[in-house]
Image: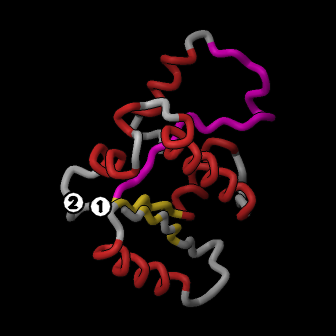
Amino acid sequence: MFCAIPIYPSEYLSTAVVDPYNALLHSGFNIPYSNLVVMLDNHAIMQLLSRHLQMEKPTFLFLNRMYSQICSCLFCGFHFNADPTCGSLEELATNLVPYPQLHFTFVRYAPIVGLRRNGFHASVNPAQDLTRAVLDPNYS
């Protein structure tokens, strides 16, 4: 069982001319060799950080922090053995991917709040706010 997490480049933060080609070739490589591919997109994460944290131009530092939060939340069930339905990578792939041929998946992370903006402000109903953020199609 192999899990790949490719990060697709953004035209605004690209460091090399060949970044789009490398991403495209890597996608083709993932089809026969990976059972689960969690796709991450620099441009989409940049837009989320700009919209929700009011950052004009997020840097790689903020993108990497967001990716580390996403990956740690995705795989924390393996570390803590908390969820019996996701005890292994095979079970995670079975739950996230409906057909073995379609092993590409996206992740969703919510809520996106900054420490300076939100501080220690306690929400009246945090479960309702979190549910609204996860299910709102305009949030992403």
Q: Contact (CB < 8 A) between labels 1 and 2?
A: yes
On screen, 140 above or below 131? Answer: below
Residue drawn at the location 51% of the way across and 46% of the way down: 75
Residue drawn at the location 45% of the way across and 44% of the way down: 108
On screen, 23 above or below 83? Answer: below
Q: Horizontal placement of 65 versus 134: left or right?
A: right
Magenta residue span: 105-123
Amino acid beneath label 2: Pro
**Where does label 2 land, which residue?**
100
Q: Residue furthest top?
A: 124
Considering depth in this image, is 67 or 58 the residue closer to the camera?
A: 67
For the N terminus, give its image quadrant.
bottom left
Q: Residues within 10 Å of mark 1 (few under 14, many from 20)?
A: many
**Where does label 1 land, which residue?**
103
- Measured as percent of width and height from the top left, residue 52 is found at 62, 42
Circle 1 SS class: loop
- Measured as percent of width and height from the top left, residue 94 is found at 27, 48
Q: How many marks?
A: 2
Residue drawn at the location 75% of the way across and 59% of the way down: 61
Which SS type dominates the magenta stretch? loop
Residue drawn at the location 29% of the way across and 43% of the way down: 95
Q: Residue furthest bottom?
A: 17
Q: Horizontal placement of 73 versus 134: left or right?
A: right
Amino acid beneath label 1: His
